[in-house]
Image (cartoon, grey):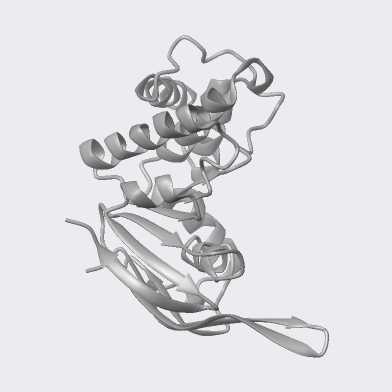
Amino acid sequence: MPLCQLQNVSKHYPMGDHVVKALRNVNIEIESGEFTVFAGPSGSGKSTLLNLVGLLDAPTDGLVLLNDTDTAQLSESERGDTRAAQIGFIFQSFNLIPVLSAIENVELALRLSGEKDPKKRLELSRSALEQVGLGEYIHRLPRQLSGGQQQRVAIARALVKKPALVIADEPTANLDSETGNQILELMQRLNQEQQVTFIFSTHDPNVVSRAKRVIRLQDGNILTDERIP
């Protein structure tokens, strides 16, 4: 059973007197353990597609299934609970809370996913930060960390709850090339060692070159869907 399925999915946005067709009858299946990139120029539909897979938006037509559950049948509260428990997010702007330390930022993800044991939250958060190489920096605030270190905190936050899926929206966009490569290598290692499923949205050729599967979009349509041996 695929981890995620999109069946005849379209997404339309009203723009004044016009309707923008961001996605047109898209069909995709994502298996557990994939390292997949949605690639394409601005306006191609890749960010819209990522938002639908991440349950941040709903399709105009078609079905989005996560673990064989039709997400259209979920209430807003249930969608939020599903996101908190099953999906991790990594953003280009890191989206860390500035007044919280690294370990507090990671621990917050566990609070939101329903983990009630404070001791367990701290142990899991510390372990997640150690996995991404930040064991010595757990009490630093985001402003005391470099961009690459902040993105590592974001990765730890995404992974600490053991999600079924991690969504990364342009994760290297605000990083220099060397730091971006380090972040990509870290995510590749986590994918290979822990079978974490990653889906990226990007136009960065370096990210595309590391993918195991590249789905290219243009004008809301899938142009190509290539699996890399």
Q: Quadrant of the N terminus?
A: bottom left
Height in image: 120 above or below 28?
Answer: above
Q: Does 34 sit left or right of 40 as displayed?
A: left
Specify whether residue 81 is in view: yes
Residue positioned most to the left: 229
Q: Does 104 sit left or right of 224 as displayed?
A: right
> In percent of the image, x 22 and y 40: which residue is there?
192
Specify whether residue 107 is in view: no
> In percent of the image, x 52 and y 23: which residue is there?
149
Which x, y percent locates residue 168? 48, 48
Which x, y percent locates residue 38? 43, 62
Based on the displayed image, in which of its 4 quarters is residue 162 positioned?
top left
Based on the displayed image, in which of its 4 quarters is residue 77 positioned?
bottom right
Which x, y percent locates residue 84? 50, 50
Q: Quadrant of the C terminus?
A: bottom left
> In percent of the image, x 22 and y 58: which residue is there?
228
> In percent of the image, x 38 and y 52: which residue is there?
208
